[in-house]
Amino acid sequence: MINRRKWITRLGITLGASAYFKSAETLGATVAPSEGSTRAPGVSLALTDYEPRTMLHVKETRVERSRFPAVDIHTHISLSTKSENGIELAAARKYLGRPDELLPVMDRKNLRAMVNLTGGYGDGLVDVVTKYDKAYPGRFYSFTEPSYERFLDPKYPLIQAEAIERAHRDGAKGLKILKTLGLYLREDITSGKLVRIDDPRFDPMWDTCGQLNMPVAIHVSDPIAFFTPTDRFNERYEELNQHPDWSFHGRDFPSNAELLEARNRVFAKHPKTQFLVLHVGNFSEDLDNVSENLARFPNMTVDIAARIGELGRQPRRSRKFFDQYQDRILFGTDATPHGDEFPQQVFNDLLYEIYFRFLETDDEYFDYAPAKVPPQGRWKIYGIRLPDSILEKVYNRNAARLLSIKV
Ligand SMILES: [Zn+2]
């Protein structure tokens, strides 16, 4: 740690070329360079060029296969062919990875099944189920999604509930809600006032899922840093600077707390519907909050997708969380075939090995994503070494129960 701190004080670090940093562009620029440095005093280094290499000598364990057969409850194998202002608007699917590309990786990693959350609806869903679920039984499961393009029809609540029944007949295992609800869907679909997560027009949809025993995988809100200014204090500055459209700070966006409250009202109103709250209940920065909600709502479970960067930098709190809620935490990654742009969720061997290392070892200070620079924030993670009894539940038993499948 000393090495790292020395580096930071000795190098002048410039935080990108953003207009946010007119007066405070250079940090530490007046500090003298270290002995032997080739840099002149006061010369700054762009943060984007900074790739520190750890000097720590620590244990490195390679976990090539999960200790128990795993179900990845959170993947994206197909997407809508048309999307506008964050809202998917077509039943037709585009495919991100063919089964013959995915299966060899799955076999190498001990991945029994992938759950494709973005299976769509209507004929698009039928196509997905035919090409994956039915062609490779037990290896792929697909979820359906709401068809928001019919939102303006006065009969939408009924239409959407019936669409869930059809999707169930067509083979969907559950319903996926993207953060569209609460952050993108508006009264005129792509314009107007934002529609709240607990809008009663969706009540028949939630109830139908409950009646058909279809869990709802729901993504609400986003990392808390996305709701604060993209400035020098933002721990995800580089990520937001690269993807400015991911910021929900300002404009007419609700706060993170308002989004979670609206979500919680849905859980309370539909106790017979199971909600799988993605990304550690969408508040992995505050495991006390997630724990309180799990205690409050027996119909809530969570996955860990794309959040080992958060869990792994608070390993002791995370370990307690897994101990306490071992029956309600599911293995998931957000894996996206060929999603190289987002290394924290790219479907490949390395990504899975990082997840297994986090869950199964007590290794220290390692990357949470297969990337040169940590993509979500500049920190590293620590393994939590779960015992076999918890690992088996997280890898497959909890998923098998939620999806009513055999693993
Ligand atoms: Zn996802």
Image (spheres, helix red, strand yellow):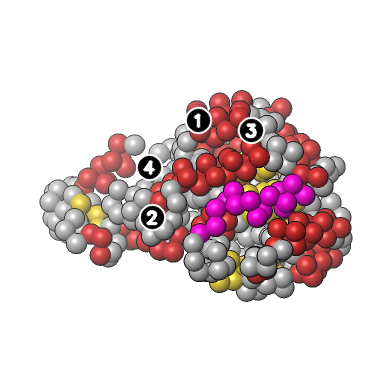
| Label 3: how many Cα within 10 Å (few below 14, some 14–19, many 20+) | some
Q: Is mark 1 within 8 Å of ligand 1?
A: no
Q: CA distance from mark 1 to mark 3?
A: 14 Å
Q: Given contact means CB atoms under 8 Å apart, are the residues at marks 3 and 4 in contact?
A: no
Name the residue beneath numbered marker 1.
Answer: 288
Which of label 2 and label 4 is nearer to you?
2
Question: Visible in this render: residue 348?
Answer: no
| 198 drawn magenta | yes
Find residue 92 and report its image quarter.
bottom right
Q: Position of residue 159 (x, y in %)?
A: 75, 62
Circle 4: residue type: Met
Percent coordinates x, y for residue 209 in the rendering: 76, 48
Give the vertical position of 2 relative to 161 (above or below). above
At 23% from the left edge and 59% from the top edge, which residue is drawn? Answer: 21
Give me the disc on residue 297: 3
Residue ID for mark 4: 55
**Toward the viewer: 46 or 273?**
273
Instruction: State left or right for residue 21 relative to residue 196.
Output: left
For the residue carrying disc 2, how many other residues have a C-alpha within 10 Å: few (<14), some (14-19), or many (20+)?
some
Which of labels 1 and 3 is toward the front? 3
Pointer 2 residue: 249
